[in-house]
Amino acid sequence: MIMLSRKARIAVLVSGGGTNLQAILDAAGRGEIPDGEVTLVISDRAGAYALERAEKAGIPSMEINKKACGGQMLFEEKLIAALEENRTDLIVLAGFLSILTPSFTTRYSRRIINVHPSLIPSFCGAGYYGLKVHEAALGRGVKVTGATVHFVNEIPDGGEIIAQKAVDILPGDTPEILQRRVMKQAEWVILPKSVETISREIVSRSER
Ligand code: GRF
């Protein structure tokens, strides 16, 4: 009897436009993520366009807002309840801006990955997110930047690095132009690849 290996059940956590979520969905549509399937999208903000992308793709989605939950612990409890209900194997932070405490990250050790828009250890850690990362790179005058996918642990952007991709900084780059190039040439390439790599790791572990 041929053992069909199961797929890792992936929950994608978002806060904004969801272009990284879309990159994962498009890669899956091209058959590039055979060992995983996105089964849940959770946004920490109402009206995030990422929720529209989930809806269009027919993927269950929900909004879990920290303030509405009444604080960090209740927020994480609600997140965990939704993730357990979904039998989640892998959590992907794709433009997700809420802090997760060590009690959350240690619960899902080596099962949470994040995409950061710089070559860690440059321009990362507390306060480095979104455009701020690219402003810092331009401000420092580096000639190369890029994106990193890493495991999430209790240190912001401190987990083991899974993949990186470099992107040239060009004369006349603004933070917005640079952000777009890093997303297009790096984030949207290495995140889907990393999702497949870690999905395969999780599935093969569960089959031993
Ligand atoms: C972007 O700044 C990206 O670099 C970072 O999150 C932001 C929005 O991503 N990872 P998305 O379009 O919501 O995926």
Image (spheres, rainbow, N blue to C red):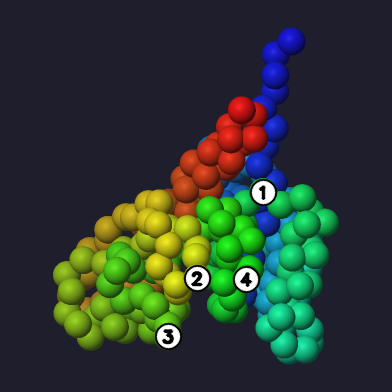
Circle 3 crowding by C-alpha within 10 Å: few under 14, some 14–19, many from 20 = few
Which part of the image, by quadrant, shows the N terminus?
A: top right
Which amino acid does the dot numbered 2 rest on?
A: Glu
Q: Quarter of the image holding residue 16?
A: bottom right
Amino acid carrying label 1: it is Asp
Circles 1 and 2, Cβ within 8 Å, touching? The answer is: no
SS for dot 2: loop
| Residue at screen point 31% across, 76% down | 123
| Secondary element at image label 1 | loop
Q: In the drawing, does residue 110 fall left or right of residue 117?
A: right
Q: Position of residue 167 (x, y in %)?
A: 27, 61
Residue assigned mark 4: 103
Q: Earlier in the sequence, mark 2 or mark 4?
A: 4
Q: Tell me the CA gap for discs 3 and 2.
A: 15 Å
- Residue linked to disc 1: 89
Q: How far is mark 1 from mark 2, CA to CA?
A: 19 Å
Task: Provide the residue designation for mark 3.
Answer: 127
Residue 53 x %, y %: 68, 62
- Please state, as top left, top right, bottom left or bottom right, where the C terminus lies in the image: top right
Which disc, if any, is residue 154?
2
Question: Does the closest atom of ligand 1 sit within 8 Å of the Cβ of label 3?
Answer: no
Q: Residues within 10 Å of mark 4 (few under 14, many from 20)?
A: few
